[in-house]
Image (cartoon, rainbow, N blue to C red):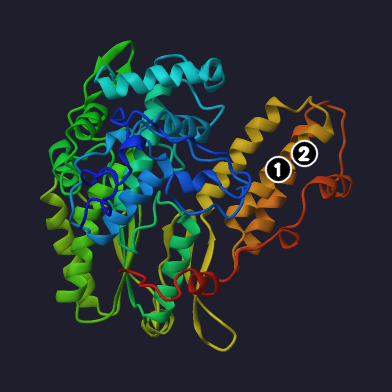
Amino acid sequence: MSGRDKPDGVGKVTSQKPAVYADEKSDNSVVPEKLSNKGLCSAETMEERELAKGNSDQPSASRTQSRTSALSGLLAVRQAARRDRRVKFTSLLHHVTVELLHESFYNLKRDAASGVDGLSWREYEQGLLTRLTALHDKVHSGRYRAQPVRRVFIPKADGSERPLGVTALEDKIVQTAVVQVLNAIYEQNFLGLSYGFRPGRGQHDALDALSVGIQNSRVRWILDVDIRAFFDTIDHEWMMCFLQHRIADRRMLALIARWLRTGVLENGKRIPAKQGTPQGAPISPLLANIYLHYVMDLWVRQWRERTARGRMIAVRYADDSVLGFEKHEDAWSFRQALEARLAQFNLTLHPEKTRLLRFGWFAIEDRRKRGEGKPEAFDFLGFTHICDQTKNGMFVVRRVTIAKRMRATIREIRVQLHKRRHEPVPVIGQWLSRLFKGYCNYYHVPGNTRRLDAFRREMIGAWRHALKRRSQRHRLSWERMTTLARLFIPYPRELPMHPHPITRFGVKTQGRSRMR
């Protein structure tokens, strides 16, 4: 490839500009005057470029130090990564510009908790340009140092606690910018079976792919896979080894290694990290996807092509994976092989959450013949997946809200209502309305309306109980409460519903491989 065709960051670029327009000083004593973009003789003719078709409605992209826009620079990286999925990038950090840091800052949550620096988003916004310029200088001069992560614990639905890391604000900004740069590379490598924390993909895309795969591939066995403490057990040496498959920029690798080793702050004491990556850091989801891409995704595709005797599907969202098999021997042998594969990279399967169950086509008939009752169900991304049949006897996958998660949400609503019970009724009603609509935005899928109706009744009951606690003599009948709730909390059938999986999945994957 010629120097003109080489993208920024991939190789050196040979300038094609005349000497008088080069970055160096001109050797000529006379420099032609640049004309305006008005009249017959426009400025484009002096600059030896095509005439502009008209003024753009969008402002021009800001320029980097290399005199190329940040957007065009990442576009060049993306194109180079797509042309050759084995090429190594030797120059990436220069794409982290002040403009990209600015964009990353405004992509952060405004009301997120503060890290060890104690800075909030709104405080940092004061004098933002000066702060980002100084941060950019520190990153590129090597003076940038990552701060330890403040560890907090949040309760889980099963009663246990999940450790989360609250990253310092400037670390969040730089990590978010680096994620955009690395996404330009790795989005060309990731397989179609990976859905977690990827641009243009979400939970419902993974749910649709799973439902369609089970129904169309005549799946009879499901392997529900969960990796024990995945984010806490990522091996740093393997992580850096995987990154070096595509990244040869030493400064970028050193930056990522610094984030991995920074550790956490507990009780005022800094504890360096020897393994794992903190959940909550902007860089962690991408690093997790890169790690599992090499450890699991590529291996799963290879195993399906070389070893599987029947049909096989795979859907992964972060460290949660669901695999479907047509033959029981394939499912059993894959589980054993996967356990051995993960052990090579210091990962283990969760013994209680990893299950092999009869599910899919003919599961209802087979268990009925054996007198074993209904087929087992499994949970994935907030939904319990159940074997069901249509009126015509066709097999379908029905998805309902996980019962324990719904109960946990109701308990939290009761706690909040108890704290806010003396606020005006319209204020509480509007708050419950927003909460219920947001809840339905995720859980309102075909087949889950009954569970949402039950959730609405429980929410109204909790609100009634809170209103009655305002006074011991207060009496509020269900008729009056139903009328009041009708003003604020709509019925689920009145809200938008997600399309059937086959409808949305068929549109998004038309003409493309679903597993690549």
Q: Amino acid at mark 2?
A: Gln
Say above or below: 423 vs 309.
above
- How far apart marks 1 and 2 lie (CA) works out to 6 Å
Quarter placement of the N terminus: bottom left
Q: Residue at x 39, y 79 (%)?
A: 363
Task: Residue 318: tell me if it is visible.
Answer: no
Question: Residue 344, percent across and down?
Answer: 10, 50
Of all residues, the one furthest to the front in this rendering is 30
Which residue appears at 70% of the width and 51% of the height? Answer: 456
**Residue at x 34%, y 42% (from the top left corner):** 181
Q: Quadrant of residue 85?
A: bottom left
- Local secondary structure at mark 1: helix
**Label 2 environment density (alpha carbons within 10 Å; few <14, some 14–19, many ≥20):** some
Q: Position of residue 412 (x, y in %)?
A: 59, 36
Q: Quadrant of residue 95?
A: top left
Q: Which mark is residue 430?
A: 2
Which residue position holds label 1? Answer: 434
